[in-house]
Image (tube, grey):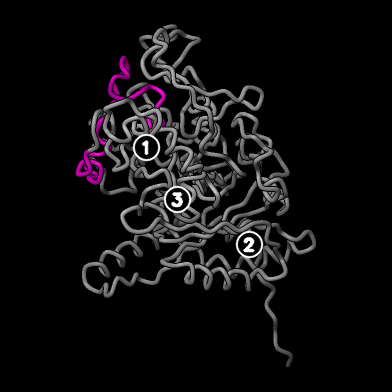
């Protein structure tokens, strides 16, 4: 089992997308693969050649320094510095295919991971909307990032040549940041990725309002991870992937139609999300957007909710559901590091008029040391739970609600059970009919996903890869 007192964290041992802000990217490709049944040994042998290409967190910090220097001294004509990143992760089925997880002592002990997302009914996914590829066996995920799709394709071709004949493509998904001033914003238009936690001993700069978590909240085997793990799982992390399509014209049409008469533009949308499109939190500026606040990382995350009031920010607003802050005594064990990217084209005039035609949305990716406390908990117990958030004291629910009648679904990612299908949010209190807003459409549609494990570099070398048999020239 894992060493209770492991050596201090070495960022050369951690895959680069996990810590340090993740792999720098303007574009990203997710390559889902299956290991050929008859080529398992060959795959593991080829891994020994592949592992040196993997981008570590130490590499990422170096890349970010190069990018900063390039922007300051070398950037010309808007050209980006050519950089790529590569990480790899495996599903439970992938570990079994490799011959791991056979004995109790070898299991990573995460029931969500072991069950697989296809069988995770707690998420309330409508499996009829899933792409058929995500219902197939997926053994692993190759993540490649870069300054452009051309850079990514070059790196992915290099990886595929190394693994040639040992894997089969199951699905590929390509993402890219949105153009111009929409860079950093998801397709509904709201600034994304604002409230990431800092990791103790890793992130040197902690912004105002930013919460700090112990290393074991993200990495297995470190302080804060209380689950028994095999020694080879040290410094790995669970990767949650979700393919989330967004019905952008339909969402915008709804919030425009329901926006209170005489109210600022997008007031309802901001209250449903918890932030204005600039990133300014409604808890700080509830009645109008403040673009300067939204773009200032030292201000846009520096607030705490009043646990007794939703006057400034609705209890069920997306950002409050996903990160309840002072609504609970502590949320550390439920924090995750998000690393997603947008996909799909910009909305056209025809779509604004007639509705969604092209598929677009978010390739959601998050890291944590425990899926049960991390992503699965957030989706099941917060986003999908109509009685959350509630006070941490049993029997003392939010003012205006009861222990059984709560503020409603997360309007953005909350999913009703397949049996009911009805969603609503209560923006004032349960006794005020005017405060109840029916949510007729799930504007974010899950089309597939999986739980993966991203091993450490030492584990990939010693546990996953097989040493190649040297070829000796004849005498």
Q: Residue at x 49, y 34 (%)?
A: 413
Span of residues in magenta:
290-319
What secondary structure characterizes most of the magenta part? loop
Task: Give the mark nearest the N terminus, 2 or 1.
Answer: 1
Q: Secondary structure at mark 3?
A: loop
Q: Earlier in the sequence, mark 3 or mark 1?
A: 3
Question: Of circles 2 and 1, which is in front?
Answer: 1
Place of residue 378 in the rendered image (x, y in percent of width and height, measured from the top left) = 49, 31
Q: Which residue is mark 3?
A: 18
Residue with the mark numbered 2: 465
Q: Residue at x 27, y 28 (%)?
A: 263
Given the current orientation, which residue lies at the most extreme left position?
292
Q: Position of residue 468 (x, y in %)?
A: 67, 71
Query: Where, quadrant-wise, is the N terminus in this rendering?
Result: top right
User: To which residue does mark 1 refer?
Assistant: 213
Q: Secondary structure at mark 1?
A: strand
Q: Are marks 2 and 1 in contact (CB under 8 Å)?
A: no
Is 97 one of the magenta-colored residues?
Answer: no
Question: From this viewpoint, is residue 13 visible?
Answer: no
Is residue 434 visible in this depiction of the protein?
Answer: yes
Q: Is mark 2 in CB contact (under 8 Å) with mark 3?
A: no
Crowding at mark 3 (Cα within 10 Å: few <14, some 14-19, many 20+): many
Callout 1 crowding tier (Cα within 10 Å): few <14, some 14–19, many ≥20: many
Q: Which disc, if any, is residue 173?
A: none
Quarter of the picture holding the C terminus: bottom right
Q: Gap in Å between the C-alphas at discs 3 and 1? A: 14 Å
Q: Residue furthest right?
A: 38
Q: How many marks?
A: 3
SS state under label 2: loop
Q: Residue at x 49, y 26 (%)?
A: 439
* Mark 2 → mark 3, Cα distance in angstroms: 21 Å
């Amino acid at each position: 089992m894992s060493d209770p007192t492991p050596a201090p964290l070495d960022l050369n041992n951690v895959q680069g997308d996990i810590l340090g802000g993740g792999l720098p990217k303007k574009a990203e490709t997710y390559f889902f693969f299956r290991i050929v049944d008859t080529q398992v040994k060959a795959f593991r042998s080829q891994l020994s050649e592949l592992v040196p290409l993997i981008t570590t967190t130490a590499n990422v910090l170096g890349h970010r320094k190069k990018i900063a220097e390039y922007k300051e001294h070398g950037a010309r004509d808007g050209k980006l510095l050519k950089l790529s990143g590569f990480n790899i992760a495996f599903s439970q089925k992938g570990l079994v295919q490799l011959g791991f997880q056979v004995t109790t002592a070898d299991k990573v002990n995460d029931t969500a991971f072991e069950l697989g997302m296809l069988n995770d009914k707690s998420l309330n996914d409508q499996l009829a909307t899933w792409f058929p590829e995500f219902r197939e066996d997926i053994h692993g995920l190759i993540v490649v990032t870069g300054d452009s799709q051309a850079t990514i394709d070059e790196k992915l071709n290099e990886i595929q040549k190394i693994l040639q004949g040992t894997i089969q493509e199951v699905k590929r998904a390509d993402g890219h940041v949105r153009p111009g001033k929409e860079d950093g914003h998801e397709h509904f238009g709201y600034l994304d990725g604002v409230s990431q936690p800092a990791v103790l001993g890793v992130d040197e700069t902690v912004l105002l309002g930013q919460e700090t978590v112990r290393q074991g909240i993200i990495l297995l085997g470190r302080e804060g991870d209380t689950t028994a793990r095999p020694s080879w799982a040290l410094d790995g992390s669970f990767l949650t992937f979700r393919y989330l399509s967004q019905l952008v014209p339909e969402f915008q049409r709804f919030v425009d139609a329901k926006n209170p008469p005489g109210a600022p533009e997008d007031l309802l949308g901001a209250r449903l999300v918890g932030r204005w499109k600039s990133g300014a939190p409604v808890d700080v500026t509830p009645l109008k957007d403040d673009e300067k606040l939204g773009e200032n990382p030292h201000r846009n995350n520096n607030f705490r909710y009043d646990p007794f009031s939703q006057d400034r920010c609705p209890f069920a607003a997306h950002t409050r559901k996903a990160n309840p802050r002072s609504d609970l005594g502590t949320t550390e064990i439920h924090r995750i590091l998000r690393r997603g990217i947008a996909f799909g084209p910009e909305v056209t005039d025809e779509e604004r008029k007639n509705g969604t035609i092209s598929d677009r949305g978010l390739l959601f990716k998050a890291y944590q040391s425990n899926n049960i406390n991390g992503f699965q908990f957030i989706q099941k117990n917060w986003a999908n739970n109509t009685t959350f958030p509630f006070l941490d004291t049993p029997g003392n629910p939010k003012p205006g609600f009861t222990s059984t009648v709560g503020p409603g679904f997360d309007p953005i990612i909350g999913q009703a059970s397949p049996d009911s299908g009805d969603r609503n949010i209560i923006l004032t209190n349960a006794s005020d009919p005017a405060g109840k807003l029916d949510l007729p459409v799930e504007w974010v549609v899950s089309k597939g996903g999986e739980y993966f494990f991203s091993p450490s570099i030492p584990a990939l070398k010693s546990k996953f890869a097989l040493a190649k048999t040297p070829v000796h020239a004849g005498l």
